[in-house]
Image (cartoon, rainbow, N blue to C red):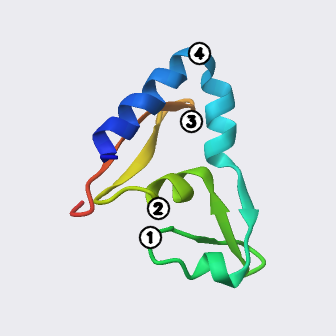
Amino acid sequence: MTPDKLCEYLNHLLLFDRDALARLVETRVPCNSDLAHQPNIPIHIGADNLPQVGLLGILNGMLDKGRICAVYDDTDGKLQRFRPWNLQG
């Protein structure tokens, strides 16, 4: 799957329940070191200095090339859309 296709799918799902997708994207759960060391899955280090994984990390891990990110509104902080992540800036 390409980042563009995955973003298209997730953006379509936003039409049905934006709040549910926002909660899924914002939730991270503790993970063990085996998962934390998977090279294609971005891991977040929590305040307790332990690894955590979220939905976007899992989805990014299945992409052959590139990554996606969630875009939030600057004024209200709400999830607006998903887009391919430009690693160059």
Quadrant in which residue 12 is drawn: top left
Q: Nearer the viewer, residue 69 or 38?
A: 38
Q: Position of residue 57 (x, y in %)?
A: 53, 59
For label 2, the SS is helix
Q: Amino acid at mark 3?
A: Gly
Q: Tell me the residue that label 4 is attached to.
A: 16
Q: Position of residue 32 (x, y in %)?
A: 73, 78
Instruction: Pick whichever of labels 3 and 2 is earlier in the sequence.
Output: 2
Instruction: Work out which residue is located at the far top of the displayed protein and give it.
Output: 16
Q: Assign the C terminus to one quadrant of the image.
A: bottom left
Please state if 60 lies on the left or on the right of 19 as rendered: left
Quadrant in which residue 71 is drawn: top left
Q: Nearer the viewer, residue 42 or 89?
A: 42
Q: CA distance from mark 2 to mark 1?
A: 5 Å
Please state if 73 lies on the left or on the right of 24 as rendered: left
Q: Tell me the residue that label 2 is attached to.
A: 61
Tell me the crowding category of disc 1: few under 14, some 14 to 19, or many 20 or more residues within 10 angstroms, Cα based. Answer: some
Q: Tell me the residue that label 1 is attached to.
A: 40
Instruction: Pick whichever of labels 2 and 1 is earlier in the sequence.
Output: 1
Instruction: Work out which residue is located at the far left of the displayed protein and give it.
Output: 88
Q: Amino acid at mark 4?
A: Phe
Q: CA distance from mark 2 to mark 4?
A: 25 Å
Q: Amino acid at mark 2?
A: Gly
Q: Amino acid at mark 1?
A: Asn
Q: Which mark is residue 73?
A: none
Tell me the crowding category of disc 3: few under 14, some 14 to 19, or many 20 or more residues within 10 angstroms, Cα based. Answer: few
Instruction: Pick whichever of labels 1 and 3 is earlier in the sequence.
Output: 1
Q: Tell me the residue that label 3 is attached to.
A: 77
For label 4, the SS is helix
Q: Position of residue 18 (x, y in %)?
A: 60, 24
